[in-house]
Image (tube, grey):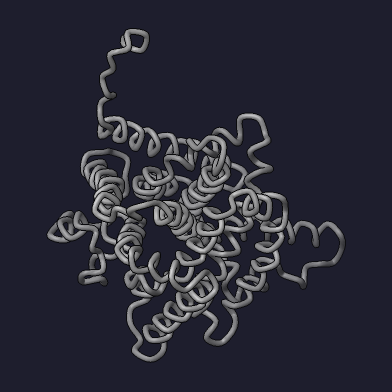
């Protein structure tokens, strides 16, 4: 868990991963109209029922509850921004030192960070009870182990555990990162971000309109389609590396939160605009990150809550990789239950899956960590 600087980032990732787990659990229990759908107003808000103050407030409460429950997939954009942020702030600092970034060790470290937990998630899927098994284990299992789930994308992208598509996306962005950080350092923040957004939007335009392809390419099968969110995180990371006090003052003292709060309705409206889907992932990722990160300072001040969220954020990768088959399995038993019964049980399920996924990652990290260096100082020897 981060301490001191950037503790806010763990809190942000903690909220984001819990939101994702809750979203997957909630949508296995019930699938009401989505806030991004045209039927949300008529099916959920229902202005025709506003015959008094109580029906109005009841409608607003229902809309907010379902909106939060059904938009959990937006938290994926938070992780893309956070990944760009972490990598860029580290690389900018390293580039300022003699010798620059040691790309060989950087790549090795990233692969060792990503693949072992990803492979462990496959082993857990094979051995663990109480998981939804919607597809047979066949030749696609080996493709999944490689992480290259864009190969034969219609068969492999959501294979076994649909959440694993994100791994396929993140390894593409990590592979591009040396080129991206070179462009960022050479062009500066503004030109780099504009260029990255242009590349990402053009890729989406090509795959959606010019040469229509499976939506899985746009979701993450083609990493360029999600480059804008990652690049925005890199810009924030560069700002942080050069002026951490100024960045945190802007983000954590209200201005970042307000910027995200203003942008979020714009992002939701973009879903309904002609051709608006080109920009929605970028807009929701940026808005969601700013809102959640901007509020992280407030959550950190609540006794125990901030620490628990930071722990969840520290192990968010493990939680993400193992949670979904369990969420599908257990939430399916609640389909005939009312909201008053199901929602508390779903929240309990979220907490349980967070503990389980975090524990697996912690055990794996401890196992992979190098043994402590021996010392001749008898005061620190056991």
Residue at the limit of the structure toward the right, as seen here: 52
Percent from the top left, x then y, of residue 213? 33, 82
Q: How many marks?
A: 0
Nearest the eye: 319 or 53: 319
The residue positioned 61% from the left and 58% from the top of the image is 290
The residue at the point 65 percent across, 41 percent down is 299
Query: Which residue extends farthest left?
Result: 139
In this view of the protein, can residue 332 be seen by the observer? yes
Q: Nearer the viewer, residue 206 or 122?
A: 206
- The residue sitting at 55% across, 55% down in the picture is 242
Coordinates of residue 193 in the picture (x, y in percent): 50, 72
Which of these two is toward me, 249 or 80?
249
- Residue 130: x, y in percent? 32, 40
For the view shown, which residue lies furthest in the front direction? 98
- Residue 28 image point, x, y percent: 45, 54
Q: Residue at x 40, y 43 (%)?
A: 319
Left/right placement of residue 26 relative to residue 255 reads left
Check the image and report above or below for 272 versus 83.
below
| Left or right of residue 130, residue 14 in this image | right
Residue 335 appears anywhere in the view: no
- Seen in the image, is 255 located left or right of residue 12? right
- The residue lying toward the viewer, choosing from 258 and 40, is 258
């Amino acid at each position: 868990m981060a301490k001191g600087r950037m503790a806010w980032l763990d809190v942000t990732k903690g909220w984001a991963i819990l939101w994702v787990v809750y979203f997957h659990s909630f949508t296995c229990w019930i699938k009401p109209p989505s806030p991004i759908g045209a039927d949300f107003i008529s099916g959920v808000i229902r202005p025709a029922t506003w015959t008094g103050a109580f029906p109005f407030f009841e409608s607003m409460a229902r809309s907010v509850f379902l909106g939060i429950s059904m938009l959990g997939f937006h938290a994926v954009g938070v992780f893309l921004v956070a990944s760009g942020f972490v990598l860029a702030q580290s690389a900018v600092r390293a580039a300022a030192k003699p010798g620059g970034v040691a790309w060989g060790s950087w790549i090795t470290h990233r692969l060792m960070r990503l693949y072992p937990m990803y492979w462990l998630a496959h082993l857990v899927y094979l051995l663990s009870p109480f998981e939804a098994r919607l597809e047979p284990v066949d030749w696609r299992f080996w493709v999944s182990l490689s992480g290259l789930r864009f190969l034969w994308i219609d068969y492999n992208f959501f294979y076994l555990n649909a959440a694993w598509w994100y791994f396929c996306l993140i390894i593409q962005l990590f592979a591009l990162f040396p080129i991206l950080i070179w462009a960022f350092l050479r062009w500066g923040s503004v030109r780099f971000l504009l260029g990255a957004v242009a590349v990402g939007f053009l890729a989406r335009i090509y795959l959606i309109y010019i040469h229509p392809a499976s939506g899985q390419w746009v979701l993450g099968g083609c990493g360029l389609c999600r480059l804008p969110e990652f690049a925005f995180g890199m810009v924030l990371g560069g700002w942080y590396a050069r002026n951490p006090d100024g960045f945190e003052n802007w983000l954590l003292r209200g201005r970042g939160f307000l910027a995200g709060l203003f942008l979020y309705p714009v992002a939701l409206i973009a879903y309904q605009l002609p051709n608006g889907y080109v920009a929605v992932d970028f807009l929701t990722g940026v808005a969601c990150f700013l809102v959640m990160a901007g509020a992280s300072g407030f959550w950190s001040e609540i006794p125990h809550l901030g620490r628990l969220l930071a722990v969840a954020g520290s192990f968010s990768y493990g939680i993400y990789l193992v949670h979904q088959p369990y969420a599908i399995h257990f939430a399916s038993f609640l389909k005939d239950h009312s909201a008053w019964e199901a929602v508390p049980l779903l929240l309990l399920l979220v907490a349980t899956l967070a503990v389980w996924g975090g524990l697996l990652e912690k055990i794996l990290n401890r196992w992979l960590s190098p043994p402590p260096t021996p010392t001749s100082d008898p005061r620190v020897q056991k």
